[in-house]
Amino acid sequence: MKLKITAIGNSAGVILPKELLARLRVDKGDELHALETPDGIRLTTYDPVLAAQMEVAEQVMREDRQLLRKLAE
């Protein structure tokens, strides 16, 4: 799929066709992450930073389950 870079104010942007938005399962206002891979740039809804933060949060919740339960009372 060929995309064209266009001017948006003082910046540049790419218009994503409806078909591509549907394949990415995103809509206007959603966030995409551009990840650099050995094969090029990959657009994804997956945020590796958020995923790492969530893993830490889940680990804390597993380890301190009793403490968190007491705090919730």
Image (cartoon, grey):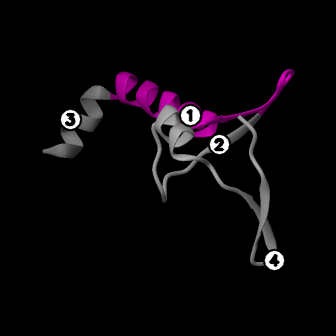
Kindly identify the amino acid type of the residue bearing the numbered disc 1. Answer: Tyr
Which comes before the other along the chain, label 3 or label 4?
A: 4
Q: Secondary structure under badge 1?
A: loop
Report if residue 51 lies within the magenta region. yes
Check disc 1 and report the residue beneath it: 46
Of circles 3 and 2, the one toward us is 2
Please, is residue 8 above or below residue 42 in the view?
Answer: below
- Between label 4 and label 1, give the one nearer the viewer: 4
Which of labels 3 and 1 is toward the front? 1
Calculate the distance from the C-alpha at mark 3 to the C-alpha at mark 4. Answer: 51 Å
Q: Residues within 10 Å of mark 3 (few under 14, many from 20)?
A: few
How far is mark 1 from mark 2, CA to CA? 7 Å
Q: Please identify the quarter of the rendering in which residue 66 is found.
A: top left
- Label 3 or label 1, whichever comes before in sequence order: 1
| Spot occupied by residue 26 in the image (x, y as percentages of width and height) | 47, 44
Residue 64 or residue 6, whichever sits in front? 6
Q: Residues within 10 Å of mark 1 (few under 14, many from 20)?
A: few
Instruction: Residue at 56%, 34% (x, y): give it.
Output: 46
- Observer-side mark, 3 or 4, equals 4
The numbered mark, 1 or 2, whose residue comes first in the sequence reads 2
The residue that label 4 is drawn on is 10
* Left or right: 56, with 67 as reference point: right
Say whether marks 1 and 2 touch (CB < 8 Å).
yes
Q: Nearer the viewer, residue 4 or 39?
A: 4
SS for callout 3: helix
In three-dimensional space, the C-alpha distance between marks 4 and 1, rounded to whole angstroms, equals 28 Å
User: Which residue is labeled 3 in the image?
Assistant: 69
Residue carrying label 2: 33
State which region is magenta.
36-64
Location of residue 35 in the rendering, given as x and y in whole percent from the top left corner: 74, 35
